[in-house]
Image (cartoon, rainbow, N blue to C red):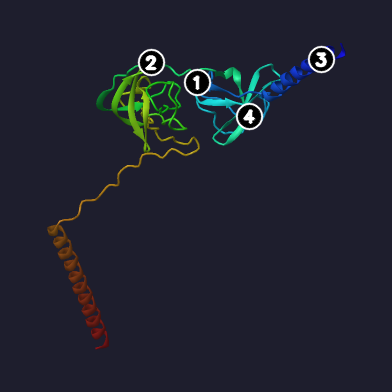
C-alpha cells in the first residue's frame, strides 16, 4: 500500500523538475527584429537609456527602414516601450513606437527614367536649400548631410517621377551624385539682383553767416597808344627842351653883355 502511494508522488516530482528545467531553458528576453519607421521620416535616435531624457549616443539618427535586433525591452517614464539594440558598433535604446515589425519600405514599382540635358537653379521654398537623395523621392535617404545652397546651378542628366508623382532630377554637386526635387528649382537664375539707387545732387548750401560778395565790375582797360602818337609826343618834348636851352643860352649871353658894358 505504501509502495503504490509513493510511486505517483515520485512521478509527480520528476514531472515538475522537467517542467522547471524547460522554463529555465527559455531565455528571459527573446530577441526579435524591428525596422526604423520614424514619423518625421528622418530616422531614429539611439540613446543611453530607455527614454528621451537620456542623452544620444550617436550624433546622427539611425536611417529610415534600417533593420535592428532588439534584445531587451523597457518601459520609459512616459509609458512608451523602448528596445535595446546595436547599430554600427554602438549600443543603446530606441523608441519602439517609431518602429514596425515588418519592412515598411514602399514597394518600388518600375520607374521610368528619362535622359535629359539641361541646367536648373536651386530655389527652395524654405530658403534653406535642397536635399540630395539616393533616389527620386523623400523616402530615400540623404546622400549629403547639408542641403545644396540656394541659387546653386545644377546640371540635370536624368529625370523620374516619385511615388508622390513629383518630378525629380539626377545631378551632381561637389563630387556627390543624387536626386533633387525639381519642384524646388527654376530654369532661370533666381538670385536677387542688387539695385543701386541714384542719389539726387545736393545744391551747394551758402552759410547764413557768410557775407554776400557784391558783383565786381570788370576793370576798365585803357587803350594802348599807337606808334604814331608815341612819336609825336617825343618830338614835341624834344622841341620844348631845345627851345628852353636856347632861351637859357640867350639870357646868359644878355647877362654877360650887360656886365661887360658896366665894367667898361
**Disc 1 target residue:** 41
Marked residue nearer the N-terminal end (2 or 4) = 4
Residue 201, horizontal then vertical, whole percent: 37, 32
224 lies left or right of 77: left
Q: CA distance from mark 2 to mark 1?
A: 15 Å
Marked residue nearer the N-terminal end (2 or 3) = 3
Q: From the viewer's perspective, is residue 39 above or below residue 46? A: above
Q: CA distance from mark 2 to mark 3?
A: 68 Å
Residue 163 is tagged as: 2
Q: CA distance from mark 2 to mark 4?
A: 32 Å
Q: The N terminus appears in which quarter of the rendering?
A: top right
Whether pointer 3 and pointer 1 mark residues with C-beta atoms closer than 8 Å, the reply is: no
Between 107 and 259, the residue placed more toward the observer is: 107
Residue neighbourhood size for the residue with mark 3, other residues' Cα within 10 Å, grouped as few (<14), some (14–19), many (≥20): few
Residue 9 is tagged as: 3
Between 191 and 52, the residue placed more toward the observer is: 52
Query: Which residue is rendered at x = 16% and y = 67% of the image?
Result: 239
The quarter of the picture where residue 212 lies is top left
Instruction: Mark 2 vs mark 3: give the one in front.
Output: 3
Amino acid at each position: 500500500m505504501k509502495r503504490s502511494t509513493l510511486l505517483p508522488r515520485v512521478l509527480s516530482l520528476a514531472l515538475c523538475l522537467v517542467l522547471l528545467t524547460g522554463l529555465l531553458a527559455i531565455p528571459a528576453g527573446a530577441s526579435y527584429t524591428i525596422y526604423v519607421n520614424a514619423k518625421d521620416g528622418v530616422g531614429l535616435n539611439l540613446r543611453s537609456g530607455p527614454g528621451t531624457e537620456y542623452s544620444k549616443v550617436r550624433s546622427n539618427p539611425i536611417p529610415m527602414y534600417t533593420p535592428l535586433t532588439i534584445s531587451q525591452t523597457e518601459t520609459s517614464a512616459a509609458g512608451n516601450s523602448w528596445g535595446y539594440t546595436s547599430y554600427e558598433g554602438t549600443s543603446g535604446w530606441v523608441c519602439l513606437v517609431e518602429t514596425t515589425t515588418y519592412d515598411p519600405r514602399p514597394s518600388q514599382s518600375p520607374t521610368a527614367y528619362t535622359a535629359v540635358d539641361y541646367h536648373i537653379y536651386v530655389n527652395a521654398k524654405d530658403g534653406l536649400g535642397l536635399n540630395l537623395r539616393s533616389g527620386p523621392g523623400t523616402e530615400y535617404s540623404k546622400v549629403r548631410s547639408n542641403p545644396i545652397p540656394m541659387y546653386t546651378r545644377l546640371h540635370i542628366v536624368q529625370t523620374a517621377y516619385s511615388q508622390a508623382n513629383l518630378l525629380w532630377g539626377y545631378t551632381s554637386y561637389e563630387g556627390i551624385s543624387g536626386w533633387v526635387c525639381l519642384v524646388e528649382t527654376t530654369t532661370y537664375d533666381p538670385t536677387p539682383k542688387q539695385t543701386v539707387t541714384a542719389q539726387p545732387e545736393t545744391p551747394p548750401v551758402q552759410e547764413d553767416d557768410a557775407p554776400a560778395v557784391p558783383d565786381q565790375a570788370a576793370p576798365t582797360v585803357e587803350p594802348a597808344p599807337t606808334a604814331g602818337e608815341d612819336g609825336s609826343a617825343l618830338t614835341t618834348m624834344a622841341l620844348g627842351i631845345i627851345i628852353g636851352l636856347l632861351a637859357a643860352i640867350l639870357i646868359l649871353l644878355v647877362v654877360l653883355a650887360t656886365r661887360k658894358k658896366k665894367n667898361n
